[in-house]
Amino acid sequence: MVTIKLKFTQHALNELEDYFDLDSVEFGDDGWVYLTESFPEDEWVYRMILSLGSEIEVLEPEHIREIMKERAKKIYDKY
């Protein structure tokens, strides 16, 4: 299990309601939605994050931020 801190748009909140307990989200004064949740660290988590594109950002842990950067770069390089 890994605890992931996420920042995402309210638009993405609609898509994420199937995955998260929305009672645990925090609405920031900056217009972003914040969530800290524990998941098994596996391919599903990475794909779920990537599927939301620029609507989501991993704030913590740093190693998952790096994984997302590497995967996004591979996609970018492909096009």
Image (tube, grey):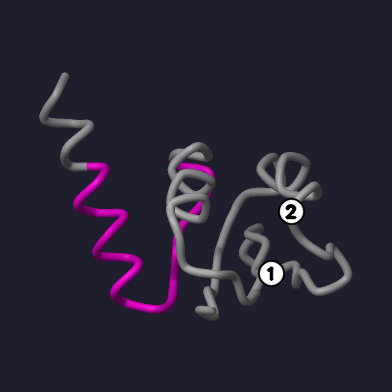
Secondary structure that dominates the magenta span: helix
Q: Is residue 62 above or below residue 13?
A: below
Q: Is residue 48 magenta?
A: no
Quadrant of the image occupied by residue 78:
top left
- Residue linked to disc 2: 19
Closest to the observer: 11 or 24? 24
Please give the name of the residue rendered at 53% of the width and 46% of the height, measured from the top-left corner: 48
Between disc 2 and disc 1, the foreground one is: 2
Please give the name of the residue rendered at 19% of the width and 31% of the height, measured from the top-left corner: 76
Answer with mark 2 or mark 1, whichever residue precedes in sequence: 2
**Residue type beneath disc 1:** Asp
Secondary structure at numbered mark 1:
loop
Please give the name of the residue rendered at 74% of the width and 53% of the height, measured from the top-left corner: 19
How dense is the environment of label 2, judged by Cα within 10 Å: few (below 14), some, or many (20 and up)?
Answer: few
Q: Is residue 58 magenta?
A: yes
How dense is the environment of label 1, judged by Cα within 10 Å: few (below 14), some, or many (20 and up)?
Answer: few
x, y percent for residue 37: 65, 74
**Residue type beneath disc 2:** Tyr
- Residue linked to disc 1: 29
How many circles with numbers are drawn on the protein?
2
> Hey, which residue is sitting farthest top in the picture?
79
Magenta highlight range: 54-72
For the N terminus, the image quarter is bottom right
Residue 52 in the figure: left or right of residue 79 = right
> Hey, which residue is sitting farthest right in the picture?
23
Residue 33 in the figure: left or right of residue 2 = right
Please give the name of the residue rendered at 44% of the width and 64% of the height, measured from the top-left corner: 58
Cα–Cα gap, marks 2 and 1: 24 Å
